[in-house]
Image (spheres, rainbow, N blue to C red):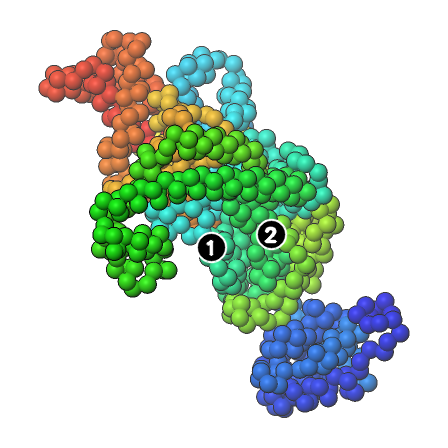
Amino acid sequence: MLSMPALVCGQTPPVFETDVLPILETNCVSCHSGDAPKSELDLSDIQSLVNGGLTGLVVSKGESQQSFLFHLVKRGDMPPQPDKQLSAEDVKVIKDWIDGGLAATSKYTVPELKESITAEQRQHWAFQPLTLVHPDSKSTGDTIIDRYVNEQLDRIGFVQSEAADQRTLLRRIYLDLLGVPPTPDEQREFLDDDHPAAYEQLVDRLLSSNQFGMRWGRYWLDVAGYADTVGFDHIPTLIIVANGKWKYRDYVISAFNRDLPYNEFVRQQLAGDELVQWKDIDGYFTPEITDHLVATGFLRTARDQTHESVGVITENYYNVLHDTTEVITSSFLGMTVKCARCHDHKYDAITQQDYYQIQATLMPAYNPEQWRPVYPFNEGGKTVKDRAIPSVSSKRHDEINSHNAQVNARIADLEKSKAELRHRTRERLVDQKAQSAIPEVLREDLKNAVAKSDGDRNAVEKYLVEKLGAIIDVTEDEVTQGLNEDDKKSIAVIDLSVAGEKQKLTEVGRIQALYDIGETPTTFILTRGEFSFPGRPVDAGGLAALSESTERSVLSPAPNPAGSSGRRLALANWLVDGKQRSSALLSRVIVNRIWAHLLGRGIVKTTGDFGVQGAPPTHPEMLDWLALELQRNDWSLKSVIRSIVLSDVYQQSSQVSTKNWAVGNEKDPSNNYYWRMPLRRLESEAVRDSLLSVADSINLEMTGPPVMLKPIADGRIDIDLAGLKSPAEQWRRSIYMLSRRGYPYTLLDVFDQPRIETTCNMRQVNAVALQSLTMLNDNFVYQQSEKLAKIISQGLTDASKQIEQVYLHALARKPSDEELAACLLLYQDAMTSEGRSAHSALTEVCHALFNTSEFLYRE
């Protein structure tokens, strides 16, 4: 009886020929039998039924919830005619027959599940386990990275370029690790240190800086598709900010600064709510619980158009599911799965079943049948519901809501009393105006008409108000001025009481987390990706190509302290399990991203596409070595970064001799084998942060809500100065500015900050005229030029010395004689021909250097 859980103990399960076939013959067999049964599904005998049809197998022995046939009849899709649907009793017979083990008097064989991924597809290089292949013993280099690179260079008969000079390397490492250039004092400290390990010690110091997380956290936010705004953000003047979304941004920055092991970073983002017990806590969450819940904000980055004001639009629910599925696979596995929403991927080994297996891990949280959020929040005296989790336990949240409701009721009573006092004064003033200006015959009718709302007025009253209403209209200011002394005192007391009551309101912070809402629903493969045409059901699982078989790609729920479905935790555990191919791909993808950020291009050029359409790795052995190093070093991302920046490959010059340039361009014009360091333009945030840092304006305050933006009349998006808590807020690092999906801060937008739809694996780098025009004309850029000039002018009066300091601040080097002469000419011309002050003239020099390519690029 243990094999028949759906049946009452001792009950005989239905038999196909006597109990099920008659139902099918009456309702289904006319279409599903013969030489050409519909959908190639023949239901006329037991063997044909278990063989399935175009959609695959339709029954799963002992599992009605995983049987397509059961769901078809249960939801009335078969038979398709509305007036011929099966009765509840017939549906139960079919369910009990499946759960009872598909009993039949005729012999039949359950076909083996057809393997949808071929052995050849599983041999794709990215799907293989990590393999350690040491560089050739003949290859040279101080680090193993250099030996891997030199081995490839030896094959094409070439060598690495010379090492960059110390100043160039210093500026490069600061910009790469912190996103700002070194100050003159930091330059002096490093250049004066002749210790052999000075550079290594500098690297360790920079990796320990809080600014490291501000720099590298932005890279991950791109990958995660993060935005502070709600929905598509396609109207420049409409900014809807997701309350508390910024906490995920702060979590990412903290994770990079703490060097949170990458495997744990993955687990927390996919299933932080399933890693801690948070549902039955009394009082406030611990920092650990809060961190884990905030981490799941990764799964809330999709363009969610399902907030309460939109109404019920089922398609929007599924769009969030589809976008989130894409975010997961693209971020962690470097695979694009969009095609598999509608059909098996045309090129990569990703089936439609794979796609919906991953989506099934999200279904308990993003259930289209039970979508609406459950937590009420107090917002401006009103109760609104949000998918977010309160930053306190459910018990404490209920207590706070009850308390706030009582306070709001008292406030409402006080406001009502105040309104009555003002209404009495208004009536008196209206009466006075009517007495002096309106004939007695119309007076009462007009006063009555004015007192009504427009919708309650009849035609005559509307006419009276239109013609005469303005004569007796009383403004709010007139009411205030017309209050008698007693009423003024009463209202003052009421206002004080209201202010006191408002101070008693308790605000509950929100955590934009993901969590299971209710029962685990059945997930269906959607025919052609349309939610209106659900196909056969699937279990939660991963990609079959990363498992030994399709069957083994199904994941069992992971036990968890939160008591939820455990599906997302099972997916996370599968991704980071060192014994699985998924872990190998996960590791390759993240170390390749790191390499791309430091060397300008990934070992796999297509950082977001590790499939067959993507580029193969130029150094596959080195890629695997980096991935293995990541795992061996407790999944430390900082250890990978450290290994790369300590290599000669990273430290080589971008400027090479004419001879080497000619040879290099002949043998490896694309620099695929890293024979030189490429010139790399600063990312948009690093451009702005460098300007702030050089001018000593930068505000390094960490955490908190974003710096708000606003559209201005000329079409630009600028900082909303009126919304700042303090003037210094406008100088915060760029990662703390409001992240808009469609309309970024204009300076960042010009320098290619992405407009993210789902994710951004690698930013595009464009060189357009608008960038030069912005640097020349933007008020912010000129403002920082003035600040830098002021700093330098305060300590020096000699123009040559001042210009030398401008170079040290902006470019981390001294000017050449020719450059000094040119800047002096600019300086003197501004003073003589334009009649400017010395400070203004120096501002022009600062502005000129900010507009150089050298300032905007890493050499």
How crowded is the residue under tag 1: few (<14 C-alpha within 10 Å), some, or many (20+)? few
Residue 845 drawn above or below residue 517? above
Q: Position of residue 849 (x, y in %)?
A: 27, 25
| Quadrant assignment for the C terminus | top left
How crowded is the residue under tag 2: few (<14 C-alpha within 10 Å), some, or many (20+)? few
Q: Who's the residue at 56% across and 36% down the image?
A: 505
Q: Where is residue 681 in the image (x, y as percent from the top left)?
A: 36, 36
Q: Who's the residue at 54% across and 57% down the image?
A: 321
Disc 1 designates what residue? 309
Dot 2 falls on a residue whose secondary structure is: loop
Residue 213 visible in this rendered orientation of the protein = no
User: Of callouts 1 and 2, which one flags the residue occurring earlier in the amino acid sequence?
Assistant: 1
> Between 142 and 85, which is closer to the camera in this rendering?
85
| Quadrant assignment for the N terminus | bottom right
> Between 108 and 521, which is closer to the camera in this rendering?
521
> Between 344 and 651, which is closer to the camera in this rendering?
344
Q: In this view, does 113 lie to the left or right of 17?
A: left
Q: Which mark is residue 374?
A: 2
Residue 762 drawn above or below residue 342? above
Q: Which amino acid does label 2 sit on?
A: Val
Dot 1 falls on a residue whose secondary structure is: helix
Residue 395 drawn above or below residue 522? above
Q: From mark 1 to mark 2, how far is it between C-alphas?
A: 15 Å
Residue 786 visible in this rendered orientation of the protein = yes
Q: Which amino acid does label 1 sit on?
A: Ser
Residue 176 drawn above or below residue 235? above
Rendered image quadrant of residue 726: top left
Rendered image quadrant of residue 659: top left
Q: Who's the residue at 85% across and 78% down the image?
A: 12
